[in-house]
Image: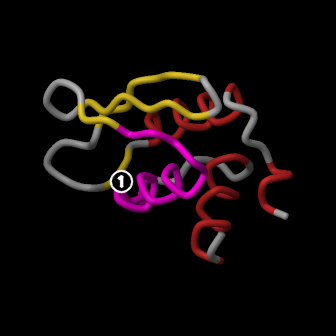
Amino acid sequence: MSAKQKRLLRSILIDPPTGNTQWRDVESLLEHLGAKIEPHHGAKFHITLNNVETTLHKPHNSNVCSKRDIHLLRDYLINANIGVESLD
């Protein structure tokens, strides 16, 4: 995992959500973690990681994820057994 991906994972799991997380960085992190990402309807993406499924929305009119999106992503990663121990 690159240093940038470690910082992003830490910011998602530990830090308060920020309003400057880029969608392409989230997508790259998910792919590195082994997630299967499939386009769904419109801006939706079906994500499968560790046999846990969810649907995430790509941000509209910008590539920056909202704080709500980061909260949803945090909950999803925790449900998929991705935690701070993944940072080691």
Question: Image point 35% across, 59% down: which residue?
Answer: 24
**What amino acid is found at the position of numbered circle 1 in the picture?**
Trp
Q: Nearer the viewer, residue 80 or 57?
A: 80
- Which percent across, then down, holds residue 33? 60, 51
Quadrant of the rendered image containing residue 60: top left
Quadrant of the rendered image containing residue 7: bottom right
- Tell me the element at label 1: helix
Q: Does the magenta stretch include residue 25?
A: yes
Quadrant of the rendered image containing residue 46: top left
- Which percent across, then down, holds residue 42? 13, 30
Q: Is residue 75 magenta?
A: no
Q: Is residue 8 left or right of residue 36?
A: right
Quarter of the figure with the N terminus: bottom right
Q: Mark 1 points at which residue?
A: 23
The residue stretch that appears in magenta: 19-37
Quarter of the figure with the C terminus: bottom right
Q: In this view, does 24 lie to the left or right of 33?
A: left
